[in-house]
Amino acid sequence: MPDGLNVDYDGLIPNNVGLAGDARVRKALETWHPGYIDWWKVRGPDGFNDALVYLRTAVSVDPSGWAKFGFVRMPDYKWGILLAPAVEDRRIPFGRHRGEPAWQEVPGEYRAMLRRLLVIQGDTEPASVEQQRHLGATAPSLYDLRNLFQVNVEEGRHLWAMVYLLQKYFGADGREEAEELLRRSSGDQDTPRMLGAFNEATPDWLSFFMFTTFTDRDGKMQLEALAQSGFDPLSRTCRFMLTEEAHHMFVGESGVGRIIARTCEAMRDAGIDDPTDIAAVRRLGVIDLPLIQRKINLHFSLTLDLFGNEISTNAANAFNAGLKGRFREHTLTDDHQLAGDTYPVLRLIDGAVVREDVPALSSLNMRLRDDFVDDTQGGVGRWNKIIARHGLDFRLALPHVGFNRRIGEFARAQIDPAGHIMGAASWQAARDDFLPTAADGDYLATLMRPVREPGGFAGWIAPPRLGIDNKPGDFEYVKIHD
Ligand SMILES: [Fe+2]
Ligand SMILES: [Fe+2]
């Protein structure tokens, strides 16, 4: 049943896009499927293909109840093609075609631009699965192990979502791009993933939780912008992806929060009230708050680079074309075309950080990045409340947006986390105060020991307040030997 809330589970590929009646696309997807499963087994979660994992699977796109939970072997997960319900008489919400009926087919003049947007988004999805491939070996609990795998299978589904659009609307080119999405590989020398942050290692669970807090939130912002698209199948695809994405950021933010809670608790029990007494805190086998700050500095700055150049003609073109909008475009009250408008952009001019009004169309990347920073602040505030509740005098903060950047206005500047411009030599000398060090990595590695008895947790992380799907604390979320 196309466009329905319920998902057709009869064929190989669950879907609500009427695949049963679309032989061409069904064949393309079924041809791609074995390569995907090979990719999952070789570059997905290492060593857990036979484990039974308590996963949620989408069985509907009804916002009030779209998932069911059950034990699944990950290679048997029902990766499906799910679009949010069509909005009747939907109109293009922004750009030069504003007010025209939303496109159900790709407009010829924007074909190349749209294909590029799909490929870039699609590339990030399998990349994060590859980056997280080895984390199963060191999970601090079965609860966390299950959450990792839930994120992984859903990123796999997000790849399916983009591959469907490529194969349905881009013919042979689309099939070629779908193959390439399985060929590139995170961190590979010759065929890396397309964006920098998706080629970084995720060596430990603190990195994983930071990645899901910050980098998955970039994913959310990009999906929000694409959910506005005048190309209706993309809009509907992204709207459903966003319902899954929320869980990824929950995993990240609550994971970091539980690490902070455990650190504060252990310090209080041991009578240590100086968070900067690293040696004393590490003797307790927990993660010191200054190291958590350095990890924030790293993951936040890597993620900001994903928004691209602050001033960008590509972003202006995609907006004018009606392909990629702004965060919550429908709640904004301007003319949604922005021809004469300006937007304040932070720039580096004559060695100083200044705010300059720039044409609004050229500064859409900056605007989305600002929305991202706002969205991120809330989580940091909640982390600080945990610290305050334990009576410790320490505050975590996001670094300045110019800190440690590789792309955009600040790529060539040395700026400290507080926003001061520094000379290259003094920045280097202070580097180890700003960013995680090799010694930090070594310390974290000593903590990364798997805990696999139901209800058990590693000593550096507090248990969650609630189980997944309201399961009790000792629920066996992953049955490893079965
Ligand atoms: Fe995703
Ligand atoms: Fe995600």
Image (cartoon, rainbow, N blue to C red):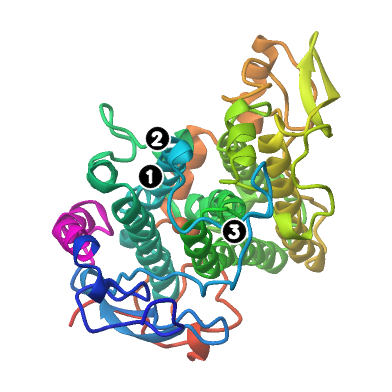
Name which residue lies at 73% across and 43% down. 398
Magenta segment range? 26-48
- Mark 1, secondary structure of its residue: helix
Magenta-colored stretch includes residue 32 = yes
Magenta portion: prevailing SS class:
helix
Q: Residue at x 58, y 38 (%)?
A: 318
Is residue 59 one of those drawn in magenta?
no
Nearer-N-terminus badge (3/1): 3
Q: Determine whether the beta carbon of the residue marked 2 sits less than 8 angstroms from the nearest atom of ligand 1.
A: no
Image position of 40 with respect to 207: above or below: below
Is 344 in front, or is 477?
Answer: 344
Q: Secondary structure at mark 2?
A: loop
Which quadrant of the figure contains the N terminus?
A: bottom left
Residue 339 vertical position relative to residue 53 in the rendered view, above or below? above
- Residue 123, label in figure: 1
Alpha-carbon distance for marks 3 and 1? 29 Å
Q: Which residue is mark 3?
A: 101
Which residue shows up at 44% across the image and 88% down it? 474
**Quarter occupied by residue 422:** top right
Q: Position of residue 403 (x, y in %)?
A: 68, 29
